[in-house]
Image (cartoon, grey):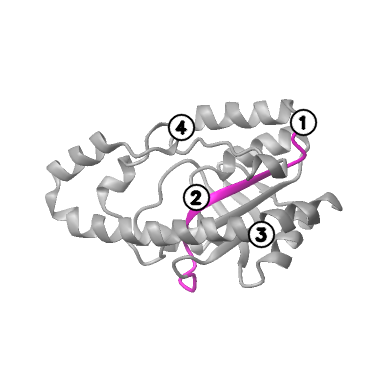
Amino acid sequence: MLKRRGIKAITGGGDSTTLEAGLRAGVAAGACGIISFGMGGALDPALRLGDMVIGSGMVGGAEAPCDGEWVAALGRHLRKAHVGRVYANGMLCAIADAKAALFATGSIAVDMESHIAARVAAEAGLPFAILRCISDLAADDLPPAVAVAMGEGGRLALGAVLGSILRQPSQIGALIGMARRFARAHRQLRRTAQRITGRLCFDLRGV
């Protein structure tokens, strides 16, 4: 569906080198802009599971505003979305206290990839936007296995997860709960993409 809309999806969760290379290849192929799209963690306590966040700017591993016209276009199609700064530096923010510290700096959500997309877009002079779906709350402490769960290309690193569980079996209950919440948020993300992709692409042609 995305290819028919002229959109190329580049996956690189857990592998910043692969992600950056894919983005640069997309730029070389004539991309007209970059949207960092996927899951994210809440820093703002008001955010709930499945909420959509439209980035107004990027801080952390790179600092850049998001393109105002693209932000407005996303907002027209996602009127309930929250708009605010997103923090990303490639590190998982897994502890509630750390999330609170980042929220105090003015960011409302965190992810692990947007700084790479922001940097590539800035170097290429392309519009940049962020659209993320909240998969963990500001008050959540994530179980240790989450930190090693993402393998190459965003796939589950099952061996690393099992190793973490063997070392700390007490996390199993929290890990199961986290997996269920992530699955719910991922379904919301897919529904959102299916609902807005065609209209958004049409809207952005006039930007």
Give the numbered dot on residue 30: 1
Expressed as whole percent of the image width and height from the top left, the position of residue 196 reads 66, 59
Residue displayed at 68% across by 50% down = 129
Task: Name the side, left or right, on which 120 lies relative to 112.
Answer: right
Quickly name the residue at label 2.
Answer: 111
Residue located beneath label 4 in the image: 15
Q: Pointer 1: residues within 10 angstroms few (<14), some, or many (20+)?
A: few
Amino acid of disc 2: Asp
At which x and y percent is residue 37?
58, 49
Q: Which residues fall within the magenta stretch?
A: 31-47
User: Mark 4 is on which residue type?
Assistant: Asp
Camera-side mark, 2 or 1: 1
Q: CA distance from mark 3 to mark 4?
A: 28 Å
Dot placed on the residue nearer the N-terminal end, 4 or 1: 4
Which tag, 2 or 4, sits closer to the chain's start? 4
User: Mark 3 falls on what kind of element?
Assistant: helix
First in sequence: mark 3 vs mark 1: 1
Q: Which residue is mark 3?
A: 196
